[in-house]
Image (cartoon, grey):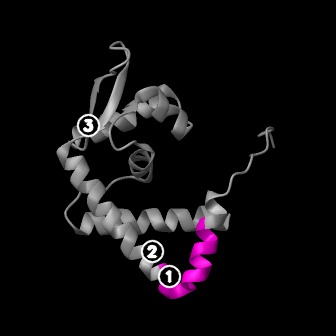
Amino acid sequence: MLLLQRGRWLDRVMTARLHARGWPKLTSAQSLVFASLHPESTPLAVLTERLGTTRQSTHELVTGLVKLGLISLVPDQDDPRRRSIELTPNGRRLARQAATIFAELERHLADQLGSDRLELLRDTLTAEWEPPQNTAP
């Protein structure tokens, strides 16, 4: 629960700081799309899998970001019947500013927690592990 709460805090801070710099106010679902994209191109089906949502929900999120001019849908290079998502030049600028903000927040966390604890947190979050197979309550 703590990890979920901290992740939501991070998302709120990130979107608020981007908005303060003149970017549209993104929803947490829209910012998750950005976090799930490959810098070059991401097939729509891969994004749906990464988000763990339905094709319809993913399409609605993507449509909103297309309307904001942050991403575009292009024919997939391997299969023209499928589409992939690419960042527009504006979307790339947003991604660069988001990376700058993340670096600022990471420096803040290092000051608050100490570099050693932040490194331990990073190591813990990047460790290989297998989630439980049964997701039923």
Asked if labels 2 and 1 touch by Cβ distance under 8 angstroms, the answer is: yes
> Magenta segment, which residues?
109-122
Alpha carbon of mark 3 to alpha carbon of mark 1: how far? Answer: 35 Å
Q: Which residue does the image show at 63% across and 65% down from the upper left?
A: 123
Which kind of residue does numbered mark 2 sit on?
Glu
Q: Position of residue 35 (x, y in %)?
A: 43, 50
- Magenta residues: mostly which secondary structure? helix
Alpha carbon of mark 3 to alpha carbon of mark 2: how far? Answer: 29 Å
Find disc 1 in the rendering and name its residue. Answer: 110
Is residue 24 among what the camera can see?
no
Q: Which residue does the image show at 37% across and 18% down from the upper left?
A: 78
Of the two numbered discs 3 and 2 in the rendering, the one whose residue sits closer to the viewer: 2
Q: Where is residue 32 in the image (x, y as percent from the top left)?
A: 45, 49
Q: Position of residue 47 (x, y in %)?
A: 46, 35
Find disc 2 in the rendering and name its residue. Answer: 106
Alpha carbon of mark 1 to alpha carbon of mark 2: how far? Answer: 6 Å
